[in-house]
Image: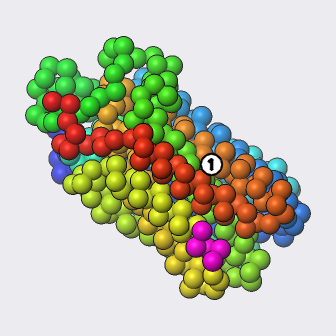
Amino acid sequence: MHLTHGIRANLDQFLHQLLQVLLVGLTIGMMRTVVPALAEAEFGVPKNSFMLLTAFVVAFGFVKGSLNFVAGRLSERWGRKTVLLLGWAAALPIPLLIYFAESWNWIVAATVLLGVNQGLTWSMTQAAKLDITRLEERGLTIGLNEFAGYVGVALAGIITGYAATALGARMGLLVFGLAVVLVAMGLTQLWVKDTLPWAKAEAAKHKTGTANTYWPRYAQASGDHPGTWEVFSLLSWRDRRLMAVAQAGLVEKFVDALVWVFYPVFLYQQGISLPNIGWIIGIYGFVWGGSQFFTGRLSDLIGRHRPNVLGMWTCGAGVAMMMLGEGVTWWSLSAGLSGFGMALLYPNLSAAIADISPPTWRGSAIGIYRFWRDLGYGIGALGLGLAAHFSGQMEAAFWFVAISMFVSGAILWWLGEETHPRLNPAK
């Protein structure tokens, strides 16, 4: 069977995968406005208990990071669709745990399952799209993937804010969550195809030298199918380029951890209503998601390296800006600036990994990159919790994240290089 690569050639399946990642974004988005803002009133978290408040995101980060690591390897053995279905099955209990929660520990447990869900499903939607598209569409592909996902995150934050106001926090999240997960499972089973055969077809073309394309500067491994530890070591320290991207991925999640944990609490303490909190945080998500329509495609034209470095610094500036003014308009602009920085870096860090990872172990490389990246949720949440705890002020967490982004961006600029095969080919 002849398999053709490209968005146009596989448009039906590409659109199904975009819908899947939108539903993935809706699933995590239901936890990002109502739950942190009402942690004290609804779930019994004492005021200014910064470490306890961050516990659920710490748990999420370590679980999701680990499942990203596993998902890539499993998908190369079982196929992308099977892993995607397992991810949706893990999400089914989440709305029920929130509805029946008797303490904050129930929320932490729900977030552990959310980490399993996100680690399996988001990894697979990204890997599947890369399987069926061409090299020169890679930035656009990941940009569209992350656009759909983070528009879902933003929409869920706004919708659940209104649902909690109308139905109550628990019932609103129960109805919304169950609807999203059940629809996603049905669509996966009925319409999503396994794309692993496309990845194998691409690998065969490269092996025989018949691929009509620029040759990437692939990371060097011991063979076509290196072991898990070898791929892990390449991304973590042995290949300077992969390591530079991986550390940037880890640190940029500090921003999302801050937005998740402390933005709702900070804004709620300033007297902002739940719907307005949803809109402010939604602007961050909408700008992040919407801008990736062109930032991913932009990197296909000008390369990955410059947008990645600029994105790290822009995102850090947006976080710092939150502390330098007040009011709904100011905080919305600050959130939007951070969202635009994320749009510059988020699809293009992933595209850089995909550029220089051979197709035979690209799924593993993406999974391990996502392991380090989403471990940033846990490390970042722990760091901002400690910063707030020892200073006694939530504002210290914002400065911790802003400084981390500037330093990590400098490391990426220093150790990284352009990975786009057309702009920096091996031959």
Please state if 239 lies on the left or on the right of 107 as rendered: left
Q: Which residue is mark 1?
A: 377
Question: What is the crowding at mark 1: few (fewer than 14 residues within 10 Å), some, or many (at least 20)?
Answer: many
Answer with the quarter of the image where residue 208 lies.
top left
Q: Is residue 110 left or right of residue 70?
A: right
Colour pattern: rainbow
- Which three-letter amino acid code belongs to the residue tagged 1? Tyr
Q: Residue furthest top?
A: 222
Residue at 49% across, 73% down: 336
Residue lying at 30% horizontally and 40% vertically, measured from the top left:
419
The C terminus lies in quadrant: top left
Which quarter of the figure has residue 351? top left
Q: Please, is residue 47 above or below residue 205 in the view?
A: below
Q: Residue at x 30, y 43 (%)?
A: 418
Chief SS of the magenta region = helix
Q: Position of residue 61 (x, y in %)?
A: 64, 45
Vertical comparison of 125 with 166: above or below: above
Observer-nearest residue: 55 or 14? 55
Q: Is residue 256 left or right of residue 352?
A: right
Residue 397 in view (yes/no):
yes
- Tell me if I can see residue 101 in this picture: no
**In the picture, which quadrant includes the N terminus?**
top left
The quadrant in which residue 36 appears is bottom right
Q: Magenta span covers which residues? A: 320-324
Q: Position of residue 32 (x, y in %)?
A: 64, 63
Q: Is residue 321 magenta?
A: yes
Give x and y (percent) for residue 423: 20, 44
Please tell me how many numbered marks the rendered image carries.
1
What is the x, y in percent for residue 71? 50, 33
